[in-house]
Image (cartoon, grey):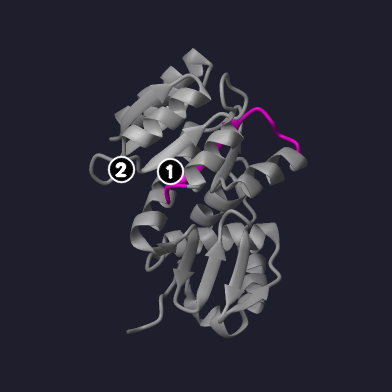
Amino acid sequence: MAEGKYRLLIAEDEVSLRTITAAFLTKNGFEVDQVGDGDDACRMVMQNRYDAIILDIMMPGKDGREVCRFIRSRYDVPVIFLTALVSENDIEKGYETGADEYLTKPYSMKLLLLKINALINRYRGLLVQSGRIVVDEIEIEPAKRQVSVSGKRIEISPKEYDLLMFLVENREQILSRDRILDAVWGMNFARYDRAVDTYIKMLRASLGDASYHIETVIKSGYIWKNKAN
């Protein structure tokens, strides 16, 4: 369930899919506006304040990438692409355009809900500066999926990045391995707990001096701790 009445915009030209998605999100506590093309999406963004925006890519008027660029030039708001474009190149273009998340059709409504809540939590609970997320000495650029520690860019794999974002978005919460697997690898991923442990180890190595943020909770999982004030 969303905290409070967060407002979403869905831009999707397939009426049945848009209606089903909007109904599911409304049931889970959101206020939802719907449009069927990119031009209307831009108009709605200018007229209203949204907590997250969900975009199809292939739609009439401005396509989703154009809408995302329009949003990024003016606002700091979470953007999720929901699209049938599934190639690696399409996904890369989506993130390069400035999307925070990229889900391919058909998608899980429950996973979409998790992503929306996590993104709203990130944008409302973290310091966001011109699209950059600042967590103590760590700076994250979602549009480029790049991470810097103490001003120095670090090399990080795509899955390490996804894991980092999930930990940061759910900071100060104990996260079980199953919950991490569902969110980072997907609900259909085989139950293989060691995948989490392996990537936690890799992420710690990548973060170097900032790895202290990730703490192991015996028999429970992991927790991200911000620097003590």
Q: Is residue 222 visible?
A: no
Which quadrant of the figure contains the N terminus?
A: top left
Q: Nearer the viewer, residue 229 or 37?
A: 37
Tag 2 near tag 1, CB within 8 Å: yes
Residue 162: quarter of image: bottom right
Name the dominant secondary structure of the magenta segment. loop
Residue 32: quarter of image: top left
Asked whether, in this view, residue 117 is left or right of residue 59, the answer is left
Q: As drawn, which residue projects farthest toward the top? A: 16
Q: Tell me the residue at 59%/53% (across/down).
A: 143
Q: Tell me the residue at 44%/23% (across/down).
A: 40
Q: CA distance from mark 2 to mark 1?
A: 9 Å
Which quadrant of the figure contains the C terminus?
A: bottom left
Q: Is residue 96 visible?
A: yes
Residue 220 location, x and y as percent?
45, 66
Q: Which residues are magenta?
A: 74-87
Q: Nearer the viewer, residue 163 or 95?
A: 95
Residue 2 is marked as 2
Asked whether, in this view, residue 85 is left or right of residue 163, the answer is right
**Residue under circle 1?**
116
Q: Tell me the residue at 52%/54% (across/down).
A: 178
Residue 8 location, x and y as percent?
36, 35
Residue 150 location, x and y as percent?
56, 82
Q: In terms of sequence position, does the residue under pointer 2 or pointer 1 come before the other?
A: 2
